[in-house]
Image (tube, rainbow, N blue to C red):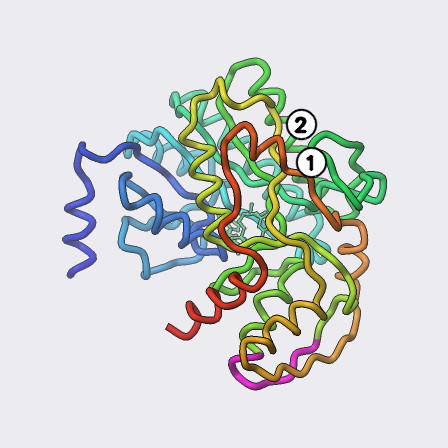
């Protein structure tokens, strides 16, 4: 009942935008929903039901164009956050499905946005777009890219589409290449999942079996930093955005071994068994260090959380 009144209260014309979030039931979704709902009318949607949101929730498949269009028209949507995905590790078991979901989903959102005059789209890309030819020790924003996973391949294809639609001024699509995201919500089958899973193992006292090499270094960031950066990017004037493709973004670089040490320094005694699998091969082709000065300069952003603050904050969030 309380949810009903909160929704009723929020459905008014004092709110800034009518926002549709697609793929809202995943790791990042509820953080976007919670933050955006503060001053926007938000409709959360996914193919997986979710009753935890304080805003309207709708079952919606991004590949179902007619339902997508109906939702956008009925609710007068002017911004879309497209978070629907099959992540890197899971995608290797379903390459065709991953390609279709990323690319057709992206194009459905593009098509409907042009037809229904949607002002802005946020669509996250990923560090998975890079590859062994990307100078992984220091990855600039615009470098050669030969991704190793189908997830990375499909994200890169959409980056090119994004560049096309922005360059032609047909749409306003904004994007960040997220590194691994650390949150209290569980990740959905990515190559960086260990970073959240280790925190849960430390709290439960269980041994953790790590699928990456103990020294595999990867860029990561706290969920609050990633969501706040995304919303900041969505709210700035288009003229301040100097590129038509996604921005690099990062916070800290870490290995599984160093992450375990940080967790232990917070008073835990986490046992980790290192047993590499195919995900370590994917991670080998990902950046070890990202250059995101372009985003920081254009948008005036910097992360609030380093590695230790991130571990502490997410442990506190899981415990609360
Ligand atoms: N989590 C990370 O570390 C990370 C890193 C880089 C980029 N990203 C990107 O951020 C976005 C969100 O990632 P996430 O971690 O929340 O992913 P997730 O896998 O946790 O969530 C994705 C959501 O998409 C939904 N979905 C799948 N198929 C759908 C369909 N046909 N229609 C509508 N929804 C569908 C799923 O049910 C799921 O709830 C994705 O674009 C992802 O590529 C995430």
The kind of secondary structure element at disc 2 is helix
> Which one is in front, 256 or 2?
256
The kind of secondary structure element at disc 1 is helix
Q: Is residue 204 within the magenta segment?
A: yes
Seen in the image, is 9 located left or right of residue 285? left
- Looking at the picture, how far across and down is residue 134, in whole percent? 80, 39
- Looking at the picture, how far across and down is residue 3, in whole percent? 20, 57
Q: Are marks 1 and 2 in contact (CB under 8 Å)?
A: yes
Q: Which residue is mark 2?
A: 160
User: Is residue 59 positioned above or below 240 on the image?
Assistant: below
Quadrant (top left/top right/bottom left/bottom right) for the N terminus: bottom left
User: Is residue 147 positioned above or below 312 on the image?
Assistant: above
> What residue is at 49 percent from the left and 68 percent from the top?
312
- Looking at the picture, how far across and down is residue 218, in whole percent? 71, 55
Q: Which residues are magenta?
A: 202-209
> What residue is at 60 percent from the left and 78 percent from the top?
264
Q: CA distance from mark 1 to mark 2?
A: 6 Å
Q: Which residue is mark 1?
A: 156
């Amino acid at each position: 009942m309380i949810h009903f009144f909160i929704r009723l209260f929020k459905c008014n014309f004092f709110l800034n935008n009518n926002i549709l979030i697609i793929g809202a039931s995943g790791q990042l979704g509820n953080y976007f929903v919670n933050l955006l709902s503060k001053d926007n009318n938000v409709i959360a949607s996914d193919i997986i039901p979710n009753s935890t949101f304080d805003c309207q929730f709708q079952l919606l498949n991004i590949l179902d164009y007619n339902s997508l269009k109906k939702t956008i028209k009925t609710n007068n949507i002017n911004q879309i956050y497209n978070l629907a995905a099959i992540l890197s590790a899971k995608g290797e078991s379903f390459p065709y499905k991953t390609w279709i979901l990323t690319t057709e989903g992206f194009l459905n959102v593009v098509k409907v946005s042009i037809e229904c005059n949607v002002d802005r789209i946020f669509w996250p890309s990923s560090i998975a777009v890079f590859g062994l030819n990307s100078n992984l020790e220091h990855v600039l924003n615009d470098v050669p890219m030969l991704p190793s996973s189908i997830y990375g391949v499909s994200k890169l294809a959409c980056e090119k589409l994004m560049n096309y639609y922005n360059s032609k001024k047909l749409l306003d699509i904004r994007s960040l290449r997220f590194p691994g995201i650390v949150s209290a919500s569980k990740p959905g089958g990515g190559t960086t999942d260990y970073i959240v899973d280790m925190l849960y193992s430390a709290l439960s006292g269980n041994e953790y079996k790590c699928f990456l090499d103990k020294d595999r270094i990867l860029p990561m960031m706290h969920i609050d930093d990633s969501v706040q950066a995304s919303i900041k990017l969505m709210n700035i004037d288009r003229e301040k955005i100097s590129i038509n493709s996604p921005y690099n973004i990062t916070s800290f670089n870490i290995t599984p071994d160093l992450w375990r040490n940080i967790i232990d320094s917070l008073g835990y005694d986490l046992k980790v068994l290192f047993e590499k699998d195919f995900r370590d091969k994917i991670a080998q082709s990902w950046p070890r260090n990202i250059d995101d000065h372009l985003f920081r300069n254009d948008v005036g952003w910097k992360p609030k959380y380093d590695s230790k603050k991130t571990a502490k904050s997410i442990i506190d969030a899981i415990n609360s």
